[in-house]
Image (cartoon, grey):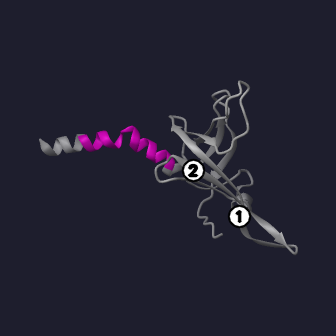
Amino acid sequence: MFPMIRLLVALALSFSPGSAEADIFTDLAGIYGVPPIMNETCNDGPQRLAFSKNNTRGELLIYSKHLRNGIETDLKLDLTIRFFVLRSTLQGIQIVIDNEEVRTESGALVEWEFRPSKDRSGFCWHRKDWPAARCDIVFQRCEEFALTS
């Protein structure tokens, strides 16, 4: 009887919201490029999406190659977008960008959402004040790619 109870508790915990929430953060963290020129953006302008250990903060690091004396250099960090995680939802992860200046028509700060693709191989940006189906700027995971700078 006790093994059956342990099994039921284990199953219940595996389907708890905390487990599902942790999965979306783990699944979305990674390095991305922009299709259809994904090979170029993975090599020349990848972006790394990362979350803090407690999933309350995050950052999107944007890299690019630079020219020095007409020669391409290694990837260098161009821009860091830091954000506060508001919540995870069934659709994705809602955030507010640090020092956000963009406002909705009603004057509220824009709340963004990272929405993963169905297979979790990519994500798109959604704004809370947009129509539910709208999701722009699609990113696709860069396979077997590691940032060295």
The amino acid type, in three-letter code, at marker 1 is: Asn
Rendering coords of residue 10 (x, y %)? 27, 44
Is 20 a magenta residue? yes
| Residue 29 in picture, x, y percent from top left | 55, 53
Residue 11 location (% of width, % of height):
29, 42
Above or below residue 139? Residue 86 is above
Q: Any mark on residue 43, and which? A: 1
Q: Earlier in the sequence, mark 2 or mark 1?
A: 1
Q: Which mark is residue 58?
A: 2
- Quadrant in the rendering for residue 7: top left
User: Closer to us: mark 2 or mark 1?
Assistant: 2
- Place residue 130 in its image quadrant: top right
Q: Residues within 10 Å of mark 2 (few under 14, many from 20)?
A: many
Which picture quadrant has residue 61?
bottom right
C-alpha separation, residue under disc 2 versus residue under disc 1: 23 Å
Q: Does residue 94 appear left or right of residue 70 in this picture?
A: left
Left or right of 7 on screen, residue 57: right
**Of all residues shown, which one is farthest toward the front?**
99
Residue at (61, 45) in percent of width and height: 123
Query: Magenta segment, principal secondary structure?
Result: helix
Give the extent of the magenta segment. 9-25
For the residues bearing labels 2 and 1, Cβ distance under 8 angstroms: no
Q: What element carries label 1?
A: helix
Q: Which residue is drawn at 63% across and 35% down?
A: 111
User: Going 50% across and 34% down the picture, which residue do you hit?
Assistant: 90
Q: What residue type is labelled 2?
A: Gly
Relative horizontal placement of residue 12, taking residue 23 as reference (left or right): left
